[in-house]
Image (cartoon, coloured by chain):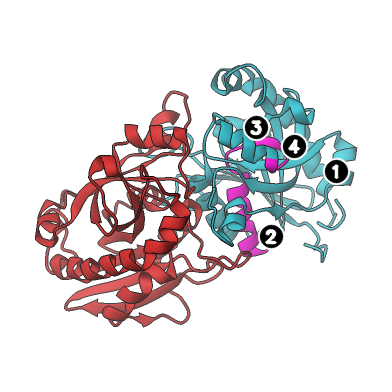
Chain colours: A cyan, B red
């Protein structure tokens, strides 16, 4: 990441179609038929450009057995693996919605950029496996981007559950999490294999350490958070034009 | 799975090298150089035959950042995805060690065959997503195999943690789990995409609802459980010769 390669091709991974739709429309991307990722993955891809920058958006797609978006780490890792192979991006952005933390200053509608990625539901208390479980991956430093677009900066903590048990809360606190979501760290495990830089742009739908249940709050604020994400994401793409990953 | 295709090629997925080594040696398989899965996955493959049956064993390999076997659902899903693409098997077997349950009659050294696969750490209490989270995949009925080789039969429940929180215990009870491990249901999510049948053969290293911590018990019994697995696994391959997946 330190060589500061110019960003010519950006892959944007968004778990849910509903999260991706406004951005795909705004950037006037074209749905690839068939998807660049091909079967048997249910993933969809959308391609286009912003100036000289090539943009590909991929969504995990609908799970064939259950008919819902294939959220979580398994779907995210498979999508990232196949998409990087197909697109060969200079930079991967994981965009979407997330939970925020009152204790970290988070509010509904905030948009964050990641400082790093960690897992909070892979507890393996054996030497070496403990760090593998957390799997910390540093994101490129995006301080200029954060300042220019008024983004908060924080640690993305990933797990496969929408709820939060006392154990999850304890691990997320140890992770110094500002963002709780379900894909980032799995994508990070794949991008580091390929040696491609990754950061996340996530908007807050619910407050993890608040009074309300996540499911209820998530459904209520998904539209507003998607809107907040939509306002920032095209500006992120504009900001990247002609830059290197060392100058964000 | 009901068409009863003859089993000509078997892919055996084993997370850890230490679990795979005795079986690879016994079956006189040859390490593929380079691996059939290719970079950037750290996975290794070993190929050979038993009579007319082609056998490929794959391990997740060592994670490049942490130097330990890439256990858990992300590594397992990626290995399964790339291995099925490369090998095009008629049947996938996920072999390895696991936790057993005193309450389900499990004892250290028992060898189980799967009746189905479920997840226990993907709690998503939203309509449709709840069942996606559990992601139940039925295994082919292996009653003849179980009787012939004196295997216990039970539900494989998968999660990314070696320990067991009260919430995990509750979900595993709802899953009617006989086997707690870290890869099966992720592999099942991939095999169902490809329409390839999957069952698991797992030997018990530790008792989840017992008095001792899993890490301690796991390290102590890994050798004995690997030995028990090693006694059964070649017999499973012998049993499969010339059969169809409808006649197990």
Label 1 chain ID = A
Q: Earlier along the polypeptide chain: callout 4 or callout 3?
A: 3
Q: Secondary structure at mark 2?
A: loop
Q: CA distance from mark 4 to mark 3?
A: 15 Å
Q: Which residue is mark 1?
A: A145
- Residue A95 included in the magenta stretch of the image: no
Q: Which residue is mark 4?
A: A233
Q: Quadrant of residue B36?
A: bottom left
Left or right of B110, for residue A54: right
User: For the residue carrying disc 3, how many other residues have a C-alpha within 10 Å: few (<14), some (14-19), or many (20+)?
Assistant: many
Q: Which residue is mark 3?
A: A98
Left or right of B147, for residue A82: right
Where are the magenta residues, as a range?
A174-195
Q: Which residue is mark 2?
A: A196
Q: Earlier along the polypeptide chain: callout 4 or callout 1?
A: 1
Depth check: give the residue in front, A141 or B23. B23
């Amino acid at each position: 990441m330190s060589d500061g390669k110019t960003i010519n091709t950006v892959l944007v991974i968004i778990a849910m179609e509903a999260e991706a739709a406004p951005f795909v429309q705004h950037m006037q991307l074209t749905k690839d038929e068939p998807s660049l990722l091909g079967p048997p993955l249910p993933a969809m891809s959308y391609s286009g450009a912003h100036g000289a920058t090539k943009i590909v958006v991929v969504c995990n797609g609908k799970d064939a057995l259950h008919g819902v978006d294939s959220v979580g780490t398994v779907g995210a890792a498979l999508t990232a693996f196949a998409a990087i192979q197909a697109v060969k991006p200079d930079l991967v952005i994981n965009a979407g919605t997330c939970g925020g933390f009152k204790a970290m200053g988070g509010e509904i509608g905030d948009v964050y950029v990641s400082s790093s990625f960690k897992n909070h539901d892979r507890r393996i208390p054996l030497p070496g496996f403990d760090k593998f479980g957390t799997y910390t991956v540093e994101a490129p430093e995006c301080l200029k981007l954060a300042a220019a677009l008024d983004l908060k900066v924080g640690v993305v903590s990933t797990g496969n559950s929408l709820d939060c048990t006392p154990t999850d809360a304890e691990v997320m606190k140890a992770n110094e999490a500002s963002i709780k979501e379900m894909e980032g760290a799995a994508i990070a495990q794949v991008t580091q294999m390929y040696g491609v830089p990754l950061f996340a742009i996530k908007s807050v739908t619910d407050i993890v350490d608040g009074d309300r249940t996540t499911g209820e709050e998530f459904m209520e604020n998904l539209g507003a958070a998607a809107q907040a994400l939509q306002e920032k994401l095209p500006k992120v793409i504009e900001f990247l034009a002609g830059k290197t990953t060392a100058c964000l």
